[in-house]
Image (tube, coloured by chain):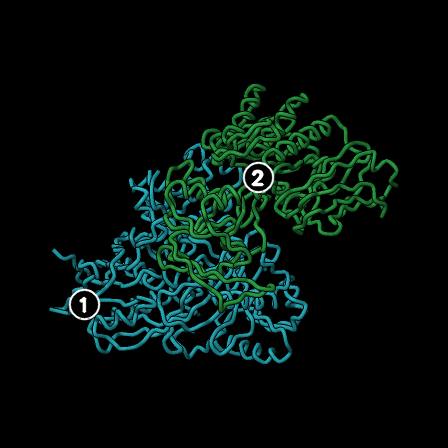
Chain colours: A cyan, B green
Amino acid sequence: MVESYDVAIIGAGVCGANIARRLSQYELRVALLEKEIDVSLGTSKANSGIIHGGFHDNIKYLKAKLELQGAMMFERLHNELDFPFERCGILVVALHEDEMRAIEQLYLQGVENGVIGIEMCSRERMLELEPKLSSDTVGGLYAPTGGIVEPYRFVFSLVESARKNGVELITQFNVAEAVSENGFWTIKAEDGRLIRARYVVNSAGLHADEVSKAFGGEEFTIKPRKGEYYLLDKTTKSRPGKVLFPVPTAVSKGMLVVPTVEGTVLLGPTATTVEDKEDFSTTRAELDGILKSARSMVPSISETDVITSFAGLRPVYGDDFFIDISKKAVNLIQVAAIQSPGLTASPAIGEYVKDLLKKLGLRLVEKADWDPYVRKVPRARDLSPFELDELVKKEPEYGEIVCRCERVSEAEIVKAIRDGHTTLDGIKYVTRAQMGRCQGGFCTYKIIKILMRETGMSYEEVTKRGGDSVVLKGEL
Amino acid sequence: MKNFNFDAVVIGGGAAGMASALELKKRGSSVVIIEREEELGGILMQCIHNGFGLIEFNEELSGPEFAQRVHEQVEAQTIPSFCGTTVLDIRPEGDRKIVYCVSSREGVMQIQARAIILAMGCRERNRGNIRIPGSRPSGVFTAGLAQRLVNIEGYIPGKDVVIIGSGDIGLIMARRLSWVGCKVHAVVEILPYPSGLTRNIVQCLNDFNIPLYLSHLTTEIYGKDRVEGVEITPIQNGALVYEKSFRIPCDTVLLSVGLVPENELSRNAGVEINPATNGPWVDSTLMTSVPGIFACGNVLHVHDLVDYVVEEARRAGSFAADWLAGKHPVRELRVKTGANVRYINPSRVDPSRQNKLYLRSLIVKNDSVLEVKVDNRVVKQLKKAHIQPSEMLTVSLGPDELAQSGMDAQIEVSLL
C-alpha cells in the first residue's frame, strides 16, 4: 500500500522546511522528503547565517522582494521556535575613497527598497559603531535591521514544528523517478520506496535541476558555486559586534566577518564555480585569501584563533530565484536557484509557495489546533549557576557536561538523539557538542557511547553523517 | 545550592592536581580536588605504555601505574575530591575566590577558597588549528582521541593509517595501532626534525619500519564519506614543492600536532596568558596575575614528562601554602629569553632562594651551552650535549648567582 499525500516537498533544507511548516497550518497530508540521513545537511548547513539588510539587490528582483519580507518575519519565528537569532546590524566597509561610490549606490537602493534605518556613515561613525574596524576605513553603510541566526538550528526547529503539526519527514529518500497518473504523482526513491502526492514542491537545492528532470519539468542546470569559510574560537579578541561586509563584487557580496549568534566568528565565503555537487572540500589558496580579506577589515584577526574550516555550495542558476508553477510538469512548483539571500527570504518563500499551491487549486482549510510553538530546550551554556542547579535537581543529566568547550550537557545530547538526530554531525548541529575549540577531541567517544546506549546501535552503525561515514572500524 | 569552604581548591585531578594537593595537605591546608572525569588520574589513565616515573619513582611505570601511585597517596592523606564534576566559573571576590562547579549528583556547588591551583592540563591541536584543506570525511582523529578509543573503549578507529605530526602521542599510537593489526603507512612532519622524544622515534617507528617524512606538509585530506587518502608535499627551502606531491591512500588520519594548555577558565577569572606558552604568566612562586591563583603542569606549559609535571606541581602546592600563611617574596627579578630560547617558565625569580626554571630551545644543536647573564655578566654556563625544541631544559638559579644583583637587575638565559 503506497502512502498518499496532498503535497510532497522534495528537500529538507531551509526552503523545504519553511514550506512544510507553513503548510502544516492546514488540513493537509504533507510529506517532506530528504535524501540525506538528517535535515539541513546541504546548502542550509554551510552558509553565512545572516539576515540580510535588504540593500544588495533591487526590489525588481523576486529575491529582493522575498528578502525584505522574509527578514521581517524572524522575530515571530524566533518567538515561536527554538533557534538563536539577533538583529546585530550590518556594516558595509569602504576601505578606499572610490569604494564610497558603490556605498552610495547601495544606500540609494536600500532607500528605494524601503529598508528601515539605513544610513551612510563617515569614518568616525563607522569606527564608533565598530571599534575593531581597520584604521584604513574611509566610511560605509549601516543597516541596523541586519542580523544573525544559526541556520541549521533554524531548519531543525522549523522541521520539528512541522512534524509536531502532522508533516511526515521521510529521510534517505533520494528521488529517482516520478510518474503522473489520475491526478497523482507516484514518486520512486533510489532504494525502490514509493509515495504518492497530488502536488509536488521541488526545493531540492543543488539537485533541483535533476528533480525537475525526473518530473519532466523545466530543463535547467544548477551550477554549484563553492564558498569556503574559516571559523574562529569564541575566545578570539577579534569578534566584531556587527556583520561586516566589504564592498560587493560582480559575482558575490564578498567575504564577510560574521559574529555568529553563538559567539564564534565566521570568515568567508569565497566564490568559486565547481562542477561536482558533492565537492565540499576546502583549498589552501582560497583559505589563505579569506584571512587576507578579513584582515583588511579587522586587522587583529589571527590564524591562531582558527578552529575549523568548511565549504558550502550555492545552487546557482541565472541571477534571480526561480520560484514558479511549472509550465511543463503538472502540479509541480519549482523552488530553485535559491542562493543568497535564500536564508533571509525563506520564511517569505514558504508564504509565496503556499499561495502558488492555492493558485493550482490546493484547498487550504486552517487547522483548529495548529500549534506554532515548539518546546525550547534549555542549554547548560545559557544558564546561570543558580538556574543550572535548579534544572539539575529535576533532570540530573544536565549536570553531566559532555562537551567542555561549548558546555553541552548529556541531557541536551540525549534529547537530540531522541528527536532523531542519530549521527555525530546531526548531534553536533543540534547541540554544538564537538563544535568548539577541541573539535570533538575530548567528547567524541562520550557521544558515541551515549548514541549506542540510547539507540541500541552497534559501533559499526555509528556514522559521522550517514552512508559510508562510519567512525569505528573494529573492536579489540 | 551546596556551599563548601576550603583553604585551597585544585582544579583538575591529573598528575599535577594530585601532586599539588598532596603538598598543600602536607603543609596543613584544607584542600579539595575537582575532576571532570569519573576518577582521578587524568590523561595518564589512557597512556598504557611505559616510560613514566623514571625520575619520580626511579622505575619505569605505565601511565595508570604512575597515576595509581600518586592516587594512593591522595587516599592515604584523605584528600577529598569531587569527580564527574565540571568547573563552570572561577570568580575572584576580594581575597576569596568562588568556584562554581556542577555534577549530576550534587547539582551546582559553590566552593569558597583563598587559593586556587589551576591544573587542567592541555588539549590537542586539531585539523582546524593547523588548517589542512580538503574534504571533511569521517576517519580524522586526534592521536589522543584514538588512544582513548583503543586503550579504554576497546575500538579500532581504522585499518590503514597516516599520522600527521611526530608528537609523542602520535608516535606511541603508531606502535599501538601496529600491535592491534593496523598498517601505519607514514608519519608526516612539517619540521626538519621530529617533534617527539628520540626514544619514541626509535621504539615506535624504527622498530616497526614506519617511514617518517620530515619537512613534508599534508596538503589535502580527501575522501567523500570516509577518509580515502592524504596528499603530501615536500618542503624545500621553506617552500612547498607541488611537483613532488604524492598521495598515500588510507582510511584513517591521526593528528599529533601539538598541545595547547586549556586556559579558558583561567582567562575568565582574569588570569593573563603568556602567548609564548599559551599558559598563564607566573611569578617565581608559580602564582598567576591574579593573587592567590597558582598554575602548574600542562596548563602552565606543556611538559615532556609527567615526572617534571609532578615536581612542578609540588612546588606550586608548597608556594600556595606559603601564600596562605602570608609568605610571599619581597623582591623578584625578571628573567628574559636570550638567543635561541623560546620561553622560560617562570619568568621571575626570587633571589633569596633556589629557583628552578624550565625552558625550551628554538633550535636543534649538538654541544650547546646554556648561559645565564645578570646585567650582561655571565653567572652560569652549563654544557648541553644536545638540545632540541621537543626536549625541555632546566636550570637552577639561587643566591649564588643572584646575591649581588641590583634591585632591577636583568637576567637573560641563552642557548649558544
| Horizontal side of residue A300 vs B106, given as left or right | right
Disc assigned to residue A147: none
For the question of whether residue A98 can be seen, the reply is yes
Residue A182 versus residue B178 in the image, above or below: below
- The mark closer to the camera, 2 or 1, is 2
Element type where label 2 sits in the image: loop
Q: Chain of mark 1?
A: A
Disc assigned to residue B121: 2
Residue B81: image quadrant is: top right
| Horizontal side of residue B70 vs A402, given as left or right | right
Element type where label 1 sits in the image: strand
Residue B308, horizontal then vertical, whole percent:
63, 35
For the question of whether residue B108 can be seen, the reply is no
Residue A275, horizontal then vertical, whole percent:
37, 72
| Horizontal side of residue B386 vs A353, given as left or right | right
Which quadrant does the C terminus of chain A fall into? top left
Q: Amino acid at mark 2?
A: Gly
Q: Answer yes or no: are tags 2 and 1 on the same subunit.
A: no
The structure residue drawn at horizontal position 48% and vertical position 50%, both measured from the top left corner, is B255
Label 1 Cα crowd, 10 Å radius (few <14 / some 14-19 / many 20+): many
Disc assigned to residue A178: 1
Label 2 Cα crowd, 10 Å radius (few <14 / some 14-19 / many 20+): many
Residue B115, horizontal then vertical, whole percent:
66, 31
Q: Chain of mark 2?
A: B
